[in-house]
Image: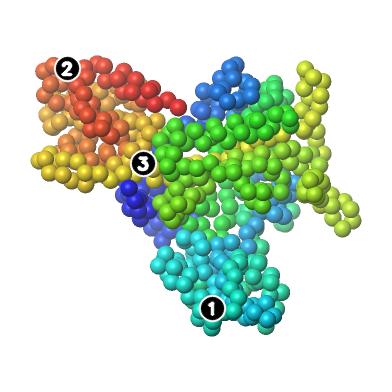
Amino acid sequence: MSKSMEQIVALCKRRGFIFQNSDIYGGQQGFWDFGPLGTELKRNVRNAWYNSMVTQHDEISTPAGAPSPFQMVGIETSIIMHPNVWKASGHFDLFHDFMVDCKSCKSRFRVDHIQTRVLADAATQAPVACETYIVDVENESGLSKAQQKRLDKAGNEYGKPTIEQTMSLDNYLKSTGGSASAPVAHCPACHGQLTDPREFNLMFKTTIGALAGEEGTAFLRPETAQGMFVNFKNVVDSSRVKLPFGIAQIGKSFRNEITPRNFIFRSREFEQMEMEFFCRPEESFEWYKYWRDRRYKWYADLGISKDNLILRDHAKDELSHYSVGTADVEYAYPFLEQGEYGELEGIAHRGDFDLRSHMEGKLVRQGDELVVEKDENGQPRHRGSGKDLTYFDDQTRERFVPHVIEPAAGADRATLAFICEAYTEDEQPDDKGSMQKRTVMKFHPLLAPVKAAVFPLIKKEEMLGPAADLYRELKRAGIASAYAHQGAIGRRYRQHDEIGTPFCITIDGDTVDKGTVTIRDRDTLEQDRVPVDKVVETIRTRLDNYVV
């Protein structure tokens, strides 16, 4: 089934999953609000992740595929950290994108989102003209796909080329030497002249203290990971954990994206689910493979079709300077072209980069080694804490810096993937037997915002009373439930199909006469009669069958 992102976004607003932030004031790009159902869905995603990582983890036995047993703990750290954290980690200097503006229409683009077709003279190889076009599917200029395709085909406007090559815009501008007389790239929206690329730091600035000046500058964290690294020693000393072990955290992060886009896929405020797994250096590749495979399986177990899910290892030129291996779990989001995938979660082998950075200072790669970056006077450019963040193994009597494996997932991206995967359209007979189109959100039952809905068939007291009692019993049992008594029963079924409720329970004449109810399955549409006093047990058993 081909899915429309426009229909999915419309359903999210209509049914209270996700709203545009500050909607009544025209909205604020890159920020989103989760409505009543979206809040429950996202909470279920977070809980499923945390339960898998920490709550349900068995530290005594060896999980399938793992090299050995291991421990897992949780942590919650502050959004605002000491500014030196971001200097030692490299974010202060390196966490930026390049952007360009159109001098005519004022559109703004990330350099890595546009490409340039260069037309060159065969004799001199010098660029003589160029055509710029979008390679991303959405951008702040608001170009439609049709406009982008039209621009993509407009390469001969400046005359027949003798040599043609395609390169990224930043490489093209570097090839011209930045000369004012050199041919310039053109705006994909209006063909106006673009400014030279310039760095744009993605961290949000804030100020600590009412009267503070520049010395009070701080930043909202762009990731949750650093909170776990700087608390490594605190966790080891207070929890008595032994290698290997992981520290898990869920929390808000902020990135001042130049072009937030694709609904909640890329936004400026988002929630991360990250885990830092500390292990012995010689065991790190085994653990990297274990977490890479386990995290892929988690999405599949929660209902993402393997037809829409891939595990992609990064090529060498994609790796961060500190990483010795990274894999992405990627999903075929509907806003992408056929055969394309977007990042859902990254699993990175970070080596000893992070703990060493916070001990020694900002690290850079020189050949095969990570060394402390020095300034022009030979001093560390950004100093670390100077604290000892090594690990002492009291069995082998060794002291060393552990290696780190980092599975880093976005709660918002995961929620979006589960929404897109769940969205289904089919045809089912209505109350009169006519086939009608049905929109149904086929969430995994553990993720569904509402697990069960209770419907009295008609508004008669002999049905309303038992329905209300059953609804309250389900709520007391901790099963997220809803109650609806207005409208035709078929309409109520359709409404709960559209929000993904897996089980609908109807109180009817047989409830009054025989003490039984019907439980309707969202996906199969099968209806089973169950004694009213067994409903809670039946629903709980069915949900338990889906435990991941």
Residue drawn at x 28%, y 45% as measured from the top left: 425
The amino acid sitting under disc 3 is Ala
**Real-space Cα separation, disc 1 to disc 3, in angstroms:** 42 Å
Q: Are marks 2 and 1 in contact (CB under 8 Å)?
A: no
The residue that mark 1 highlights is 192
Residue 303 in picture, x, y percent from top left: 40, 35
Q: Is residue 277 visible?
A: no
Mark 2–mark 3 distance (CA, rounded to whole Å): 34 Å
Instruction: Tell me if label 2 and label 3 are in contact, CB under 8 Å.
Output: no
**Disc marking residue 262:** none
Look at the picture and state if 262 lies above or below 238: below
Q: Nearer the viewer, mark 2 or mark 1?
A: 1
Q: Upstream in the sequence, badge 2 or badge 3?
A: 3
State the residue at coordinates (89%, 53%): 378
Q: Amino acid at mark 1?
A: Gly
> Which of label 2 and label 3 is nearer to you?
3
Residue type at mark 2? Gly
Mark 1 neighbour class, 10 Å CA radius: few under 14, some 14 to 19, many 20 or more = some
Q: CA distance from mark 2 to mark 1?
A: 74 Å
Q: Which residue is mark 2?
A: 515
Which of the pair 150/106 is nearer the observer? Answer: 150
Which residue is under mark 3? 422
